[in-house]
């Protein structure tokens, strides 16, 4: 098992990565929370059925209460959030209690937001079970969705620790592997050309990435995110670069209805579009066609599906958290590893969306 230290202005915490990582959870809780009064696990239906016995075995000696929520983005609603708070009250959690967010990115976002608001904030630990959650479990962004936009209701609230047990990843369907791997690709493009080239040269299928290689890849992605978060915890500057591909990606997710396209599948299309914009605006020299062909070989779509109207996507993008005064701001790349924020006019966006759609 390896570890990465995440340092922010408000907290420094460990991320433990490797097969069997939850084996260290029991001792960590006893050491870090000696006065803990109550423990509640927030998990979803799928993870509960697949992996809850393993987590309960790792928590021997603790009487953990279980709060089960729907799987995927269906967990990130006001109603489910309210149900989690009600469950915490019913189980008599207090300010010395602890929440474990056990699942993918949606459960981590929800569980962290519950922890951040319950009794004005109690500690929580992230226990990710997906590749996608290597990104969302680190950095302290917690949120639920609103019908008008993804992650619009939330907070910056760091976990006390992250236990990333790679044994849980073996049960992931290919669609979920694809969703998570898109965020790995994003980290490489905004920070490290060599990391990108290694991914492109070594990963030709997402069906069965060797555990050792996957662990190295995920650790590298976490380190990149940790470096950025350490400099800008609350996204007043460079942390926005982590949203590369997300401006259009979030709009696609919302228009398709959360869950029809996964987060990563939507972000993959958003990254291709952002690269095309980067070439037009900054003269980016990156081989976008080679990139698209690699994505397609891994099973991603690389263009907008025809039922998505450009005006609707534009309105969604105007609601993006990076937008200011109804002006859409994109994370673009001057070169690989050199991101920049750029305000894009409505006219240019609609023209580029039209051009982008012609290739479907």
Image (cartoon, helix red, strand yellow):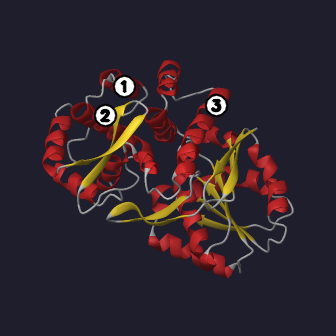
Q: Residues within 10 Å of mark 1 (few under 14, many from 20)?
A: some
In three-dimensional space, the C-alpha distance between marks 1 and 3, rounded to whole angstroms, equals 22 Å
Side of 266 relative to 227 (left or right): left
Q: Viewer-proximal residue, 275 or 60? A: 275
The label shown at residue 275 is: 2
Q: Earlier in the sequence, mark 2 or mark 1?
A: 2
Above-or-below relation of 338 to 286: below
- Total numbered labels: 3
Asked which secondary structure carries label 2, the reply is helix
Q: Residue furthest top?
A: 201
Find numbered disc 1 in the image and state the secondary structure of the residue it sits on: helix
Q: Are marks 3 and 2 in contact (CB under 8 Å)?
A: no
From the top left corner, tell me how far across and down residue 104 is, in percent. Answer: 56, 51
Q: Quadrant of the C terminus?
A: top left
Of marks 1 and 3, which one's residue comes earlier in the chain? 3
State the image coordinates of residue 319 (x, y, percent, origin top left). 29, 61
- Residue 186 position, x and y percent, is 45, 37
- Pointer 2 local density, CA inside 10 Å: few below 14, some 14–19, many at least 20: many
User: How many C-alpha atoms fall within 10 Å of the one at disc 3: few (<14), some, or many (≥20)?
Assistant: some
Disc 3 is placed on an element classified as helix
Q: Is residue 5 visible?
A: yes
Q: Are marks 2 and 1 in contact (CB under 8 Å)?
A: yes
Please, is residue 340 above or below residue 51 in the view?
above
Give residue 117's position: percent from left, percent from top: 57, 74
Residue drawn at x 83%, y 72% as measured from the top left = 35
Q: Nearest the camera: 68 or 247?
A: 247
Residue linked to disc 1: 291
Give the residue at mark 3: 216
C-alpha separation, residue under disc 3 versus residue under disc 2 = 26 Å
Position of the N terminus, as image quadrant, is: top right
Q: Residue at x 49, y 30 (%)?
A: 192
Q: Nearer the viewer, mark 3 or mark 2?
A: 2
């Amino acid at each position: 098992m390896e570890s990465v230290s995440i340092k922010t202005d408000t907290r420094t915490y460990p991320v433990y990565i490797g097969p069997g990582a939850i084996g260290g959870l029991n001792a960590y809780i006893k050491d870090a929370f000696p006065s803990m009064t109550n423990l509640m696990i927030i998990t979803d239906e799928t993870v509960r059925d697949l992996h809850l016995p393993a987590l309960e075995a790792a928590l021997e000696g603790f009487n953990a209460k279980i709060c089960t929520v729907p799987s995927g983005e269906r967990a990130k609603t006001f109603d489910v959030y309210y149900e989690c708070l009600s469950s915490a009250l019913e189980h008599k959690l207090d300010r010395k209690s602890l929440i474990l967010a056990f699942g993918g990115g949606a459960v981590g976002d929800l569980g962290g937001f519950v922890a951040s608001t319950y009794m004005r904030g109690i500690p929580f630990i992230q226990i990710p079970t997906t590749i996608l959650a290597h990104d969302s479990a680190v950095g302290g962004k917690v949120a639920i969705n609103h019908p008008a936009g993804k992650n619009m209701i939330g907070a910056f609230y760091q976990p006390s620790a992250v236990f990333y047990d790679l044994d849980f990843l073996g049960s992931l369907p290919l669609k979920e592997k694809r969703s998570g791997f898109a965020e790995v690709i994003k980290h490489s493009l905004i920070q490290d050309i060599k990391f990108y080239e290694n991914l492109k040269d070594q990963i030709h299928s997402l069906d069965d990435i060797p555990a050792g290689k996957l662990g190295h890849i995920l650790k590298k992605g976490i380190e990149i995110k940790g470096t950025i978060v350490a400099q800008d915890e609350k996204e007043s500057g460079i942390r926005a670069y982590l949203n590369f591909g997300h401006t259009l990606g979030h709009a696609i997710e919302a228009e398709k209805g959360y869950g029809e396209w996964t987060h990563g599948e939507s972000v993959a299309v958003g990254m291709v579009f952002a690269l095309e914009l980067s070439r037009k605006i900054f003269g980016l020299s990156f081989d976008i066609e080679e990139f698209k062909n690699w994505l397609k070989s891994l099973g991603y779509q690389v263009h907008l599906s025809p039922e998505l109207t450009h005006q609707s996507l534009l309105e969604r993008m105007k609601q993006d958290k990076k937008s200011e005064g109804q002006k859409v701001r994109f994370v673009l790349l001057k070169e690989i590893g050199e991101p920049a924020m750029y305000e894009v006019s409505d006219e240019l966006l609609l023209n580029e969306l039209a051009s982008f759609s012609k290739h479907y």
